[in-house]
Amino acid sequence: MTSELDIFVGNTTLIDEDVYRLWLDGYSVTDAVALRVRSGILEQTGATAAVLQSDTMDHYRTFHMLERLLHAPPKLLHQLIFQIPPSRQALLIERYYAFDEAFVREVLGKKLSKGTKKDLDDISTKTGITLKSCRRQFDNFKRVFKVVEEMRGSLVDNIQQHFLLSDRLARDYAAIVFFANNRFETGKKKLQYLSFGDFAFCAELMIQNWTLGAVGEAPIDLDSQMDDMDMDLDKEFLQDLKELKVLVADKDLLDLHKSLVCTALRGKLGVFSEMEANFKNLSRGLVNVAAKLTHNKDVRDLFVDLVEKFVEPCRSDHWPLSDVRFFLNQYSASVHSLDGFRHQALWDRYMGTLRGCLLRLYHD
Amino acid sequence: MPGKLKVKIVAGRHLPVMDRASDLTDAFVEVKFGNTTFKTDVYLKSLNPQWNSEWFKFEVDDEDLQDEPLQITVLDHDTYSANDAIGKVYIDIDPLLYSEAATVISGWFPIYDTIHGIRGEINVVVKVDLFNDLNRFRQSSCGVKFFCTTSIPKCYRAVIIHGFVEELVVNEDPEYQWIDRIRTPRASNEARQRLISLMSGELQRKIGLKVLEMRGNAVVGYLQCFDLEGESGLVVRAIGTACTLDKLSSPAAFLPACNSPSKEMKESPLVHPPSHGCRSTHNSPIHTATGSRLTQNFSVSVPTLIYTGMGSGSAGKEGGPFKALLRQQTQSALEQRGGSPHRFCRRREFPFFTLTAFPPGFLVHVGGVVSARSVKLLDRIHNPAFVGIMGNTRSYKLLDWNSFNSDEPETRDAWWAEIRQEIKSHAKALGCHAVVGYSESTSICEEVCILSASGTAAVLNPRFLQDGTVEGCLEQRLEENLSTRCGFCHIPYDELNMPFPAHLTYCYNCRKQKVPDVLFTTIDLPTDATVIGKGCLIQARLCRLKKKAQAEANATAISNLLPFMEYEVHTQLMNKLKLKGMNALFGLRIQITVGENMLMGLASATGVYLAALPTPGGIQIAGKTPNDGSYEQHISHMQKKINDTIAKNKELYEINPPEISEEIIGSPIPEPRQRSRLLRSQSESSDEVTELDLSHGKKDAFVLEIDDTDAMEDVHSLLTDVPPPSGFYSCNTEIMPGINNWTSEIQMFTSVRVIRLSSLNLTNQALNKNFNDLCENLLKSLYFKLRSMIPCCLCHVNFTVSLPEDELIQVTVTAVAITFDKNQALQTTKTPVEKSLQRASTDNEELLQFPLELCSDSLPSHPFPPVKEHLESASSNSGIPAAQRATSVDYSSFADRCSSWIELIKLKAQTIRRGSIKTTVTVEKASPVGDGNFRNRSAPPCANSTVGVVKMTPLSFIPGAKITKYLGIINMFFIRETTSLREEGGVSGFLHAFIAEVFAMVRAHVAALGGNAVVSYIMKQCVFMENPNKNQAQCLINVSGDAVVFVRESDLEVVSSQQPTTNCQSSCTEGEVTT
């Protein structure tokens, strides 16, 4: 006696959250059944392994049919084939677009192309995430990227509108898309200590302050604006950043800046002497990062540079985080007292974001 | 020109990409009705076209309106080649033809293609303007309402229940036409879908005409079926119960019609049904022209098999003549036409009712199940019917269809008339003149067809059947009889002249009338019946191998096997019923399925313990070789196991009948041999009976003889049936006896399983085991899948077995899981109606703030536990000190009525209590809304889905809700075929998707009618054929039900208490809960 056909169709589509998770995690039916058996479900319900097998198959089939709709979540809402309560629809979408921290760290900032897709095998082996799950996550990134790539307006809003994700998840996707678009390097060994959350935090600050959309008003010269509002950094801004070079190139200005900072922080900093000794190096590092951002290559290395030029020196001197905060606050604020420096607004736009990023990046 | 049909095509969405180059589609729509076709403009390059067409108007006869479906075809425009069809929508416009139903059909319909399934949706608006037409010779029957529901629909009142209506139409099957050789599978499927749609329309119209002729205005319990007879054609047949219904303006208590006595009654004995004397069991072929048609007939009267006890004794002296009189009245009522006697016609021949639930007082006595089966040969031409459907191997035969068709309907009519006659005579033998819960079915395998009919013989109250009424004294008697809740259990036949040996006792309830020891019926449990404990699903399953044979030899083999199968099915049912400690079966449905090399029998019923019937005895096991020590031990071990199971079941189903000593009952029936005996088969009846030790157990203990391995197997299989896991109940009737407190969550589902038998040396035993396992595993799977709904009950569990191929067994189950409140799981005999009435009355009092004494009395006697809980929870919310409130509860619960002073306080307390109830209501309603808002914020676009929820249920009601309007019947037929089975996920993927699509199309049609639920939903056919080698599969599904609008009871209450804000809120919450 073999079962040829075995199906269950409810008027309201049954969604088993546990099985959905197993399916998303890329387990085969056999593996999923084994995992469910291990979870003790048979003892709880008095079911047999055959029942579990049939149930798992049913759910997998349903998910497989739903997957096509999940690729365009608004379709899931309007389709008539599966009657699913809204709360369950939201859960289906949210879980489908959720991703693993380990996986996203591997592909963050990489080009979402076929080439990267070929590397998924290695990523799967490295992270222990099934290849199937890696593919789903990668395809999700790519799909979201493709949809919002050409769109104007707020990146987060666009994502939310077209994929019906929660606010939090939409922000994460915005970060992923932003990183993929600007190809920020995140894979270097030096950057391994950083979490996705750290990068997402920086991405959000950068989207808010350094992109075209951040300027507030839409650019007036519409003819030349082929750039995406939130995805690309404001080219003009990057050009202007060169002007900041004067802060380190002009020796008087550098000394004045240093003395202002030192006066303000004397006695308040545990690592005052180290700061005093390192001030010029640090300041040079930060300003040079800004000045170099006109080159795409240097944009990609932004995080590497920040870690090399600022985070690592401070960390080797064992600066506590509170001291870093005091220093960065004072370092940015003191510039306002430099009479000879004319680019106050530019400095604030640059340093405001950078300070936030650096504070987030500064940990072990 | 009595009607104008208007159609507007608004828009499409989610269309498939038809042009690979642009990834877009140039769609337009063809609207066709009858022979007229309109077209919309082509909407270029869009997957979401906005046609917004003008109104296409069709001027048609109402006859066509009833027969024809509106056909909407969506196509992709192609400049150079032929336009590609995207898919079709068939809309049955029948619901627009009667005034009380829908007025407009408007909504999104899935665009369906028989090869690709659903491909996008189309928004259509349909309206009908009907002109009055008083032509009395008209062929249309617009205005007759149809209901699938097998009881009087909830918002109607039955004025008269006229009786049985039936009709069938026959046509050639397009799959077997010569043209099928040259057309595509798609064209063939569409021809078939369209033809069946047409035939259903025609059938419905013809039935409607019959109803009008009977002066009725509705058909209740309408059951339409298709017989795919292959080469010999396609039969669409329907049965129903004609009624005159009145719309209830308010949910008042049911009042049967009570007209003044008419003189028709006097004439009635003169009117003899023409059927007298025409009872035919072994008839000669009616149509000799069709050749060697085998019309060997076969029938089994069920009760003769069921009651194998001994019973004798004197009749209740009053009972006899009274019954005779009553019977006469009923008979005359049934055989007489309502209205003018001169229009008497043969339709009254069959006093059958397809209803399974009745207005109170309608059912007087129930005799037992009557059934008849007949084996017929469809055609002399041998041709593998279903193999021909699979694409390439289509039939190449060219038949002269015209000559063939001409005699077809008559033949089928005669076949059914024959069976119905038999049912009628069986009912008569049981002293009954009516058959209720009547249904008909067929099973076809190649050229052999088994026709089956079954029902419950009953005596009915004639008052409902005609305008006339019975004489005063009889009516009084009737009232007396009806006032007791056990009336229907009393035997309708004479004790002295019993149609079969039965074991009678005095009714355990009224102690006046006789009742049988066991009662089998095909109807639902009457609402006023007193039941002890809960019920459960009982199934008998049986397989019998049969040699492959052809034509007459095959039919003979089948008819020889049938009696044994029926016998065994009943034995199994009886054993299982005893094992459960119960004494009655309701909703019995026995299905016999014929395959090429086997016969399958599946009987499902809901077992209950009726308080009026005697306590069932246990099951005794007796061995054949009493001297063998180890064997004896084995037997006693088995006996112990059976006794344990019975005890366990009694506990499980809460069967604790009150102890009644023999003296009280009085035992006027002398019982020289106090036992009944169940024989394995007739031939085995030996004198062993006297040797058996029957001292154990009660007087009517059941004896199982174990004389061979077969019997051993039977006993084993009895014990292998596993009860459902705790928290689960199941039944195949509308509702579970013993559970009244349903909550609103329902989940309707269909589950299909097909197993392949290993063909090596199949024995009956192995086959039985396989089949048993299949059904048990299927049930286990259902329990597991629905575990999140615990505590819940699977209601209306409907199993269908088919044998699509040699070694395949297909089982289809449709049922609904309904949750209930465990805390409130009190055993009350109150019917839902009573309950709601009660609630309504208390509501009114709350509203008026008018503390009547009635109220203060009723509350303590019917304490509502949840009210108290609310009260306690509310005490923290409102300003009244909790202590004060606590005292008020005390007073209302333990009121001392002696003191008027206390009365006064009590009244006050209730006023406070009422106030607090109100606050709780608002608090409760408010919190989920807050929740909803929160969710809105976190995922804004998800909350406002445009797709409305449509509930589906095989039941005639929706728990916790009130049906306010019936929108019309849904009767849909779909074919799906694939030539890429593997790509679509194999057979499971294919069928899963198809069933989901069928559900979607039913929901869309209901939503377009303005409804939010389908009740009495049934999947009448699910014919699945596969050919994995060719990567092909085909499936035909036929579903039906009643589209309705329902309103939550909670909403109604809030409306009645005039709190518009709360109402709004609750409907919001409603959305959250039900969606």
Image (tube, coloured by chain):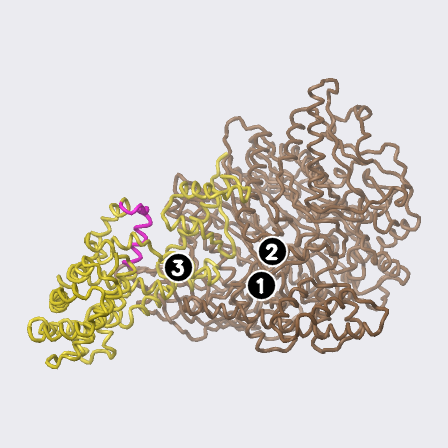
Considering depth in this image, is A217 or B735 the residue closer to the camera? Answer: A217
Q: Which residue is depicted at the point 86% across and 69% down?
A: B898
Q: Which residue is depicted at the point 60% across and 34% down?
A: B543
Residue B120 in the figure: left or right of residue B222: left
For mark 1, name the chain: B
Q: In terms of secondary structure, what is the magenta stretch mainly?
A: helix
Within 10 angstroms of label 3, few (less than 14), some, or many (20 or more) residues? Answer: many
Q: Are marks 3 and 2 in contact (CB under 8 Å)?
A: no
> Label 2's element?
strand
The colour applied to the residues of chain A in this rendering is yellow
What residue does disc 2 label?
Answer: B819
Q: Which residues are magenta?
A: A126-143
Image x and y of residue B221, in percent: 66, 57
Sequence-earlier tag: 2 or 1:
2
Considering depth in this image, is B310 or B238 the residue closer to the camera? Answer: B310
The colour applied to the residues of chain B in this rendering is brown
From this view, report whether residue B779 is shown above or below residue B691.
below
For mark 3, name the chain: A
Q: Which residue is depicted at the point 93% across and 48% down?
A: B317
What residue does disc 3 label?
Answer: A93
Count up the numbered dots.
Answer: 3
What residue does disc 1 label?
Answer: B1043
From this view, report whether residue B792 is shown above or below residue B604.
below
The amino acid type found where label 2 is placed reads: Thr
